[in-house]
Each structure stands twice: as C-alpha cells, then as structure tokens.
Image (cartoon, rainbow, N blue to C red):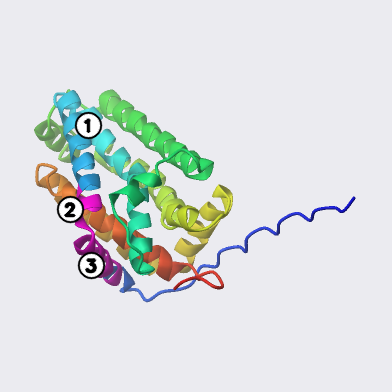
C-alpha cells in the first residue's frame, strides 16, 4: 500500500529591512485604501467608537479603570483590523472586495486567528487589572475623573505613581507590539503557525528598531487624536491604521515565491 508523503511545511517568513521613514509611506498607502473602499473601514471605525463610548458610559466615574481599559484596548486593536487587512490585500491584487470580504475573516474557521486574538485579549485584560490595581492602591486620593487622574496621578508632587504606571505599561506594550506588528496580517495571508508568526514579528521589530519606533509613535499619536475628539476621530483613525498596517507587513516581510505581488 503506497504511503502518502506528509505535506511540506510552508517556508519560514523572512523579515527584511526598510528605510527609517517608511512608516509615513504606510500611512499614505493606508489612506489611499480607505478612500478606495471607505464603507468597510468606516463601519469598523464606527464599531470601535461605539465600543469606546460604552466603556466611557460604564466607567465614567471610575477613571482609574477607564485609563487602563483604553490603553488595554490599544493592545488588542490589531484584532479589530483583521477584516480590513483582507480588504487591502484584495485591493493590492486588483480584486473586487467589499464589506462581505471583511466580515468573512471573522468566521470561526481559522483557529490561528482565534488563538492569537485570545492571547491579545488576555494581555489587554491583564493590563487593565494591573493598571486599576496600581492606581487604586497607591493614588493619594480617589481617581474618578480625568481631572482627578491629572492632579492625583500625573501631576502628583510626591511619589512615582505616574512614572511607575508608564513604565509598567511600556514593559507590557513593547513586547506586545513587537510580537504583533506583522503577526496578524501574516496569519491572514499565509498558512503559518501562530508561533512562527509571532517569532517573525519579533525578528522584524529587532531588524528595524528605528522604523518600528516611528511606527509605534505614529500609531499612538493617531489613536490619541481619535480619542481626544470625543472618540469620533476613531471612525477614521482605526481603518486608516488598519490599512496602513497591511502595507507595513508587505514591506517588512519578504513575499512568498509566486506571490501576486
């Protein structure tokens, strides 16, 4: 009886270096994709803004919790963008794409995307709990509003609460950013394991420290502007950054042999 050979594993993705200013190009390409297919992106952004408004409604008088919730949400934001990566991929391949293609990525048929999303959600939840515990335990007074957070935590004359809060957030955010910067687009685009996608993402970040620092800064700035506009700006900021993240992946990882690009 003939023995069926095992399928060869997919080739390991290869990171590649980019110019330090390349993140600005990703933003430009992402903006072009949003203009070409605005409906899927704006609906994703609207859903994100509504979720943010729900957080505000539930924790409006507990800013110690709200601060952690919003910063934790930034850790899991790449999961929200998964459908928009598919839109950018279709536009890149000059295929007809629309909202149905974005929603199709959420069907629970790919356990890799689900697993990675769960891992990011756990990390975000861990930060929310850590942030809330730190502020409620060590703040000199109750922190129930943005004004309280500014005066009691940020501008406090005694202690190092705000500095500690920032350091702990950075300690968590830096490895999460490095492990996810190209992981989700890679999982969507190729049949690689979650472990290989994460390792590729980390190697990519280590190979490009300056572009990654700039990219992380741009993501933070655009997101904060979206939040500062009473969350309305997130309607545009979320899809813009999502489409740009696809182009970041395409520049940062060598294409497969025979890839349409």
The numbered mark, 2 or 1, whose residue comes first in the sequence reads 1
Q: Does the magenta stretch include residue 39?
A: yes
Q: Give the range drawn in magenta.
A: 25-42
Disc 2 or disc 1, which is closer to the eye?
Answer: 2
Residue 66: image tag: 1
Query: CA–CA distance between discs 3 and 2?
Result: 13 Å
Label 1's element? helix
Label 2's element? helix
The numbered mark, 3 or 2, whose residue comes first in the sequence reads 3
Q: Name the residue under label 2.
A: 236
Q: Is residue 71 magenta?
A: no
Q: Do the residues labelled 2 and 1 touch (CB within 8 Å)?
A: no
Q: Mark 3 points at which residue?
A: 32
Dot 1 alpha-carbon crowd within 10 angstroms: few under 14, some 14 to 19, many 20 or more:
many
| Image quadrant containing the C terminus | bottom left
Horizontal and vertical percent position of residue 112: 52, 44
């Amino acid at each position: 009886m003939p023995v069926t050979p095992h399928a060869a594993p997919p080739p390991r993705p290869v990171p590649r270096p980019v110019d330090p200013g390349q993140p600005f190009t990703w933003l430009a390409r992402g903006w072009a994709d949003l203009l070409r297919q605005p409906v899927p992106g704006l609906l994703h952004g609207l859903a994100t803004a509504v979720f943010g408004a729900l957080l505000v409604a539930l924790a409006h008088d507990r800013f110690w919790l709200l601060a952690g919730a919003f910063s934790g949400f930034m850790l899991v934001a790449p999961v929200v963008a998964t459908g928009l990566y598919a839109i950018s991929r279709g536009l890149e391949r000059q295929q007809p794409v629309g909202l149905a293609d974005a929603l199709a990525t959420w069907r629970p048929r790919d356990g890799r995307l689900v697993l990675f999303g769960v891992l990011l959600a756990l990390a975000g939840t861990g930060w929310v709990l850590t942030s809330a515990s730190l502020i409620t335990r060590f703040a000199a007074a109750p922190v129930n509003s943005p004004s309280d957070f500014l005066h009691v935590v940020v501008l406090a004359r005694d202690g190092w609460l705000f500095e500690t809060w920032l350091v702990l957030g950075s300690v968590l955010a830096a490895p999460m950013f490095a492990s996810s910067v190209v992981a989700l687009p890679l999982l969507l685009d190729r049949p690689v394991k979650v472990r290989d996608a994460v390792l590729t993402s980390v190697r990519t970040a280590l190979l490009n420290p300056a572009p990654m620092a700039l990219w992380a800064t741009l993501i933070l700035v655009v997101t904060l502007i979206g939040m500062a506009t009473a969350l309305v700006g997130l309607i545009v900021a979320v899809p813009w950054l999502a489409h740009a993240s696809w182009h970041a992946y395409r520049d940062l990882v060598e294409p497969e042999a025979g890839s349409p690009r």
